[in-house]
Image (cartoon, rainbow, N blue to C red):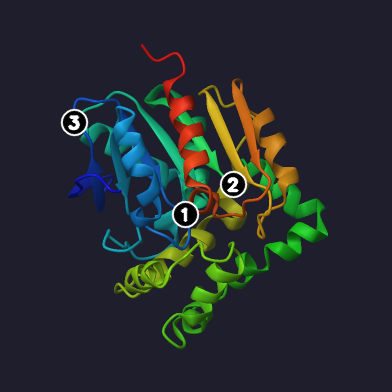
Amino acid sequence: MLPNLDHLTISTNGVRLHVVAAGPEQRPLVILLHGFPEFWYCWRRQIGPLVEAGYRVWAPDQRGYNTSDKPRGRDAYRLDALAEDVVGLIDAADRRKAAVIGHDWGGAVAWRLGSLYPDRLDRIAVINVPHPRVFMALVRRSPRQLLRSWYMFAFQFPSLPEWVARRNHWQTMVEGLLESSRPGTFSDADIEQYRNAWSQPGAFTAMVNWYRANFWRGLGEMGAEKIATPALMIWGARDKFIGREAAQPSVDLCADGRLELIEEATHWVHHEEPERVNRLLVEFLGENRA
């Protein structure tokens, strides 16, 4: 069950983000970063347990998504700008540091934060997205991963992805969610929430611009430096989009990293195995906590 939620509008890095907040304000801050094609709602099964474990939780709609600002142009969605948004959220919460948990593109932002702003992070948890350098190397050498990433190439075309996605009231998007997840993962009510978020003016183009801005340039710019922030990777092994072979090499780029494979889960592991994911997150966040 969700705790009481506050809906905030936070100005950061030149944009205004819609942020769902829960938990006592004085508690340690945890920021939850969704991926494509979701929004804050994807964390509904994590917010309550994290609050119960003693945290203040912020779950933003990242720039371009749902009711947050949608700046024009693909360059507004470069990873560096997305990471700076999160630093601004930490500042807005009047904190020096926060823990960051990210899934999919939200995980890519977490990796970038770990590279650029380790002094602003307590720890990071990344769900089903590899370190960008590992992912790009895998795309270049693996025909199987290249095939799995076909949609990322398709998203580079102007206007066409938007037209395809909007047909039949987002049915292509819905089918993508249902076909890549375990049966029953997304209810009709969940799908309606997503349709409403995708239908926000300018949202879908902004969402796709994350791919247009970063697929070749932003992801390839990640260096080989070790991620110093303590890191947990949770990986649903039946991910349709990215092979599990990207998981361990990503953890190997962390000075203090750990991998937890969940064999029976897909890319949407935080939806499918919420109790297990929540336990792993709470344990990880609580390690060495005073």
- Assess whether mark 1 and mark 2 are in contact (beta carbons under 8 angstroms): yes
Residue position for label 2: 129
Residue type at tag 2: Val
Residue 15 appears in view: no
First-in-chain label (2 vs 1): 1
Using the numbered discs, state the Cα–Cα distance from disc 2 to disc 3 in whole angstroms. Answer: 30 Å
Q: Residue at x 50, y 74 (%)?
A: 173
Residue position for label 1: 35
Judging depth in this view, the residue of 106 and 53 nearest the camera is: 53
For label 3, the crowd category at 10 Å Cα-Cα, with few meaning under 14, some 14 to 19 and many 20 or more, is: few
For label 1, the crowd category at 10 Å Cα-Cα, with few meaning under 14, some 14 to 19 and many 20 or more, is: many
Q: Which mark is residue 25?
A: 3
Give how far across and how far down residue 205 sits, in percent.
Answer: 42, 71
Residue type at tag 1: Gly
Residue type at tag 3: Glu
Which element carries disc 3, helix, strand or loop?
Answer: loop
Front disc: 2 or 3: 3
